[in-house]
Image (cartoon, rainbow, N blue to C red):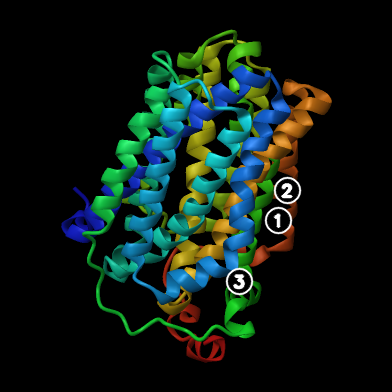
Amino acid sequence: MPSVFRELSYRRLWLARITSTVAFQIVGVAVGWQIYDLTHSTLALGMVGLVQFAPTLLLVLAVGHVADGFDRKVIIGVCQSVEGLVAVLLTFCSYDHRLTPVGIYFGVAVIGASRAFENPTSQAMVPSLVENAMAPAAIALLSSANQAAYIIGPALGGLLYVFGAHIPYGVSGILFIISSLLSRTIKARPIAARKTKVTASSIFSGIHYIRSHKNILGAISLDLFVVLLGGVTALLPAYARDILHTGPWGLGLLRLSPAVGALSTSVYLAHHPIHNRAGRKMFAAVIVFGLATIAFALSRSIFLSMAILCVLGTADVVSVVVRSSLVQLETPDSMRGRVSAVNSLFVGTSNQLGEFESGVTASWFGIVPATVIGGIGSIVIAALWMGLFPNLRKLESLAITSDACNDAEFNSTSR
């Protein structure tokens, strides 16, 4: 096993992450199928992403201060407990046939608020659990935990939904509680006190830091616009039912397919990190992502669609590992919470707001044309960003830079 797993606390974070994400994916499948079953509306599907994104947008500045000022394992554990409680409530309401689209949206919004705190805090915690030299491998393995969850969760969610919508909600509630218990046992390396004064400067310091570091700005904005345009996740229930003519089990297979490619790639990258031409490889992966999106839109076979989504997941994880490593390693620990919070806002914008955008464009142009347009848009964005951020395109290796090691002046003015 990779040497990072010798760190007990990292193993616990890794297990808590995979358990929590499996639960989240199970809820995602259940919510998507139930909403479409109740409304038969692609716009209603898109609204799931919007209500999940709204808390991230509203809480982004508070999230960074909380992650940098309090015990990160406690933050993660509390968030996972709240997510578990919501899943339990969805279980009982669904069992009594009292769950309406409004109730589902409310539950999704609360889970979205919890994830708004959990995700950046988890990302910021990784470098404090392992040596700096092992950080890229640790980040890649944490990504592999997510991808493994993306395989297990959707497949399990689709299978459980066959027995009733309350079953996947109940299982996810149990998994959230398990992940919370694991998170509370993590012990990070002692680091100098992180508490900061809440001032106008400190509140916006994460945004200022990203703006002053062009590589970070280019990487996370690239992810924002590519996934915002090219994401197909929100439309998978519609593809499963109306294009590929399958049921919840087919939706589960479609949801897990990107993760099959992503998991194998992230495990490979954990053992064989990207040592050179990192920027070019990231842009090449984004272009492949766009091409795979177009191919998926045109497929009419569930097995071909699964294979294409597997390629899409492979391309996506290369971009994710490069971007995540760059953000974490070019950011000092005292700023990681705030920078990760802003990064999570970008990711949330691309994922959740992208789901809303997909639902709206699908209602305007149709499911297939909207997906093709999104794939073309992803390729165009990659080409533009290669010109706008030439240093990012020329980035060679993922290593800790002098900016991350010697940014004392920036940190002192941000406190």
- Distance, label 3 to label 1, CA atoms, is 16 Å
**Residue picked out by circle 1:** 385
Element at badge 1?
helix
Residue 62 can be seen, yes or no = yes
Q: Tell me which label, 3 or 1, sits earlier in the chain.
A: 3
- Identify the image quadrant of residue 368: top right
**Marks 3 and 2, Cα distance to the nearest angstrom?**
20 Å
- Amino acid type indicated by mark 1: Trp
Instruction: Tell which residue pokes out farthest to the right in this image.
Output: 364
Determine which residue is flagged by label 2. Answer: 381
Please give the label number shown on residue 210. 3
Please name the amino acid that badge 3 sits on.
Ile
Please give left or right for residue 371 compared with residue 131 in the image. right
Relative to 127, say whether 253 is above or below.
Answer: above
Between 354 and 111, the one nearer to me in the picture: 111
Horizontal relation, residue 324 to residue 11: left or right: right
Image position, residue 232 (x, y; %) = 62, 31
Looking at the image, do the residues carrying marks 1 and 2 touch, with CB atoms under 8 Å apart? Answer: yes
The reply to whether residue 393 is in sight is no
- Height in image: 135 above or below 157? below
Q: Which circle marks residue 323 in the picture?
A: none
Is tag 3's residue or tag 2's residue first in the polypeptide sequence?
A: 3
Callout 2: few (<14), some (14-19), or many (20+) C-alpha neighbours within 10 Å?
some
x%, y% of residue 159?
39, 17
Neighbor class of circle 3 (other Cα within 10 Å; few <14, some 14-19, many 20+) is many
Labels 3 & 1 near each other (Cβ < 8 A): no
Image location of residue 64, percent across then percent down: 51, 69
- Secondary element under disc 3, as helix, strand or loop, is helix
| Residue at x 46%, y 86% (from the top left corner) | 406
